[in-house]
Image: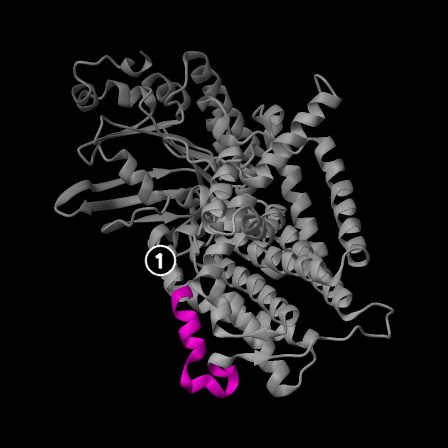
Amino acid sequence: MSGSNAAGTGALTAGRGAAVASVLGAAVAAAFLFSDYHLFQLTLVVVYAIAILGLTIVTGFNGQISLGHGAFYAIGAYTTAILMDRYDMPYWATLPFSAVVCAGVGFLIGLPALRLGGLYLALTTFALAVATPQVLKHKLIEDYTGGVQGIVISKPDPPFDLPIDADQWLYLFTLAVGCVMFLLAWNLLRGRIGRAMMAIRDHAVAAEAMGIDIAMLKTRTFAVSAMFTGIAGSLGAIAVQFVAPDSFSVFLSIFLFVGLVVGGVASIPGAIYGALFIQFVPNVADQLSKAAPGAVYGILLIAVLYLAPGGAAGFVRSMTRRLCRMVRPGG
Amino acid sequence: MTAVAAAGAPLLSVERVVVRFGGVVAVGGVSFDVGRRQICGLIGPNGAGKTTLFNCISGIYKYNDGDIQFEGKSIHATPRHRMAGLGIGRTFQNVALFKTLSVRDNVLVGAHHLGRSGFVANALRLPFVRAEGRDAEARMRELLDLLDLTRVADTPAGGLPFGWQKRVELARALIGRPKLLLLDEPAGGLNHGEVDELEGLLHRIREHFDLSILLVEHHMNLVMRVSDKVVALEFGIKIADGTPDDVRNEPEVIRAYLGESDDAGAA
């Protein structure tokens, strides 16, 4: 795991603002350039980016491996779907509820998970992911969850008579929430709390000697992480307009983990690269080989990890640094 | 428990401390004091119980009997993460830095216990969070300057030479405003020139930060030159306690180090 804040030369910091502004500009412009289907795909990229960002916080920055974040995604999605379906709540108003529910569940799971180091935590969270679809189908909560059938929710209309269609609005709304989530994560991870998370990851004994309450910090980090991924689940449910238990199989958790590693484990922009990967690479694999897309996907995955061992974010970072050196020799 | 605040009271007092691991007695009832602004050296052959005692004072081990008091208060029930807040800072024997973090961030983590901001305040970057951050950064820069680390501020700490890493650890301990600085073999792994610099540095640190230092050290020359007071252990028992000259001439100490001259560690 390479430190995300290794070297930040002046040029990099100045360039960072410009890079964020241009990516944001392009993302907004995309709403008016792409067709409905592609826009839907981009909406899912933003959703996955938020979900992976949640995983980045707990696994990348705090070193707690979770193979079960799909469960929090599912809880977020169902919270939104149930609130919209049963209580006629507007889609946007469900997000705070989803945040609170997922943070609460994340905190409760984080409590015992604390005692389980490394691989044990990975397996415990994996068990959670395995159990999730079956729990969602359970008879006791069928009235709320719709059982195997799931819940169909309606597509939100653009507000204030904006001259855009529903797909464009959905994308822009998701993008706006995504920007807020990334900003919050950026602030959190760059400050005192983020440094404490990384200190625990790098050397727990030393972190404790510096006055960091490891138990408290780890459980709260787990809760925050679950909250991010849960909000992504809510946005995903609104975008797909449907939730059903089998959409949240164990593969969802695995794909989020793949996105985390491919993007770059301890990197905030890495979450976006990872989201692009898990959204588009399966399609590419499918086009390359109709017979064995899984094999092609595997090969592409290995190729990326081989070419960019620090993830896409690490690759971009070293490229930027090389460019800076070329522009300012000896600088 | 009485709060002794008198100026003459010791900062740290170790009273008949016993540490047992299973049936093995690692420390068998050791007592000594460290006064304010005092530099105290803890010496002894391998296995004498120095590091065990050291880890008790920094809260990593719990002692089985006796007591350790810091500013007149027992630290027995103090959780490990509250030791820094009490004013006990430390470095580690084999360096325990946050390897992937920059030198700058390593030092800033040392100021963690001085901060009050939580998750929500940080995520929203409230004004008091920014003020807190600016404060810590100013002191971080000052320490990097003092310890000649400014050039490597942005380098990941794990990539630095060992001697430099030791200075990063010192900076990280000092930013937390300790009243007592615990140094576990500060000269270990340093070359001759670096050990000489360390002696001057320890004196400068005491003056500049107005603190006491307790060091565990094998390097006999350094301990004798830098300490105001030396405590010698052997097999978990204190065999001498006094000024460097007293301890150097103590027959028990000479016997414990038999076969080695006083300054054997300098080799």
Nearer the observer, B42 or A106: A106
**Main secondary structure of the magenta stretch:** helix
Q: Residue at x 63, y 43 (%)?
A: B136
Amino acid carrying label 1: it is Leu
Question: Is any atom of residue A18 visible in this view?
Answer: yes
Question: Is any atom of residue A106 visible in this view?
Answer: no
The magenta segment: A129-147
Identify residue for label 1.
A123
Q: Is residue A129 left or right of residue B248?
A: right
Residue B223 is one of the magenta-drawn residues? no
Q: Quadrant of the C terminus of chain A?
A: top right
Q: Is residue B20 left or right of residue A261?
A: left
Q: Residue at x 14, y 42 (%)?
A: B24
Using the image, determine if residue B267 lies above or below residue B133.
Answer: above
The spot of residue A215 in percent (x, y) is 42, 57
Mark 1 secondary-structure assignment:
helix
Q: Residue at x 77, y 64 (%)?
A: A168
Kindly identify which chain the residue marked by label 1 belongs to: A
The spot of residue B266 in percent (x, y) is 33, 13
Nearer the observer, B208 or A83: A83
- The crowding category of the residue bearing disc 1, from other C-alpha atoms within 10 Å (few below 14, some 14 to 19, many at least 20), is some
Q: Is residue A24 left or right of residue B232?
A: right
Using the image, determine if residue A196 lies above or below residue A322.
Answer: below
Residue A132 is one of the magenta-drawn residues? yes
- Which residue is outermost to the left? B23
- Quadrant position of residue A137: bottom left
The spot of residue A249 in percent (x, y) is 45, 66
